[in-house]
Amino acid sequence: MIRRLQYHEIDFEKYTLCLENSAQRKYSATKTFLDITSDKKWELIVYNDYEAVMPVPYVYKSGVKIVHNPMLCQQLGIFSKEDQVEINEVFLKFLEKNYLIRIYAFNEFNQFKTSLKSKKNFLILPEKYETVYAKYSPKRKRKLRLDEEVVNNSETKDINFEQAESFIKENFLGASKEEDIDSFMMIFKKMAEAGCLTFSAFYLNKRIINVIVTYFDKHTVALLGTFNDKDFVKISGASVLIDSCLKQNIESKIFDFEGSEIPNVEEFFRGFRPELRPYHLIEYSKKDIIKKLLSLKFIMKL
């Protein structure tokens, strides 16, 4: 009924067919996105003949395989034609029994009997741009009304990875280590090479002061990063870039803000009046992982 497949055993045609026809479809579960963000380190849990699927990314720590959502991959979970609590519980129990887990995030549609932690995400569903704009908060609309001097000395345009790289590195917030920034940049570069990433820049006096990074597929635009020169935050270039992206895409694509638990970032996103879409996750501490690993070793000796 349910089985675990290593990467080389996956029938990607059946996997993609299941994902694209699922009630929970997420861009972050596509083969392209997962291959790049996890460096092809993911397995698959399958129900029957790909009636339901659950991608499981992992990392190696001291030679031990540990489940962990990759950088920039917010949600995964179970994908099927119809979300069924009973099937989701089977997947959840199988995951917890057969893997060491650090963090695994399900998608917003997956429901469970088991009580799980949740996090926030924000979406704007496809609609006419005029309708979307009308819902913006008064503050967001005010921010979008640039001073005449700024209008006369600014422009927005898409740039390539090489043009964006140094600005992003200089204005990267939230990464604790230099190697984390390098890992993010490598993912951005690979996605750009795959043709699914856009870097949009706001120029003031011919100098970049804001960049947003967006991932595109046929159903979704996902905001993977917002980078700002702190000396020009009052100009609201990031708001202009996001508004421009919405104007170009929102009639046919979902706009995914990729959520945030950081209060000022959440407030910024909420100014566009997106829908709150919480999702569930399971998370274990390093201490929990070590305890489970030691207990498994003890059982194997018996």
Image (tube, rainbow, N blue to C red):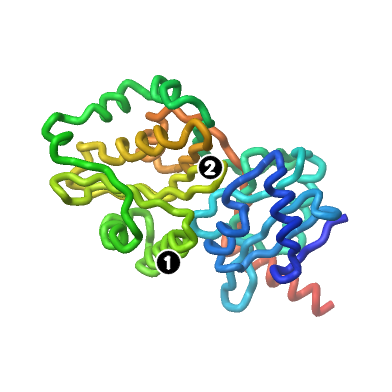
Quadrant, the C terminus: bottom right
Identify the residue under disc 1: 186
Assign a secondary structure to mark 2: strand
Residue located 68% across and 46% down the image: 20
| Mark 2 vs 1, N-terminal side | 1
Q: Nearer the viewer, residue 108 or 191?
A: 191
Residue type pointed to by label 1: Met
**To which quarter of the image does residue 300 belong?**
bottom right
**Helix, strand or loop for disc 1:** helix
The label nearer to you, 2 versus 1, is: 2
Q: Quadrant of the N terminus?
A: bottom right
**Depth check, front residue: 62 or 230:** 230
Between marks 2 and 1, how big is the CA–CA gap? 22 Å
Q: Residue furthest right?
A: 1
The residue lying toward the viewer, choosing from 159 and 285, is 159
Say few, some or many: other residues with alpha carbon within 10 Å of mark 1 (under 14 / 14 to 19 / 20 or more).
Answer: some
* Amino acid on which disc 2 is placed: Thr
Residue annotated with mark 2: 220
Q: Is residue 151 above or below residue 221?
A: above
Residue at the spot 59% in from the left edge and 72% down from the top edge: 60
Q: Position of residue 140 (x, y in %)?
A: 32, 27
Coordinates of residue 285 in the picture (x, y in percent): 58, 59
Residue 251 as seen in the image, left or right of residue 156: right
Where is residue 107 drawn, in percent x and y? 63, 44
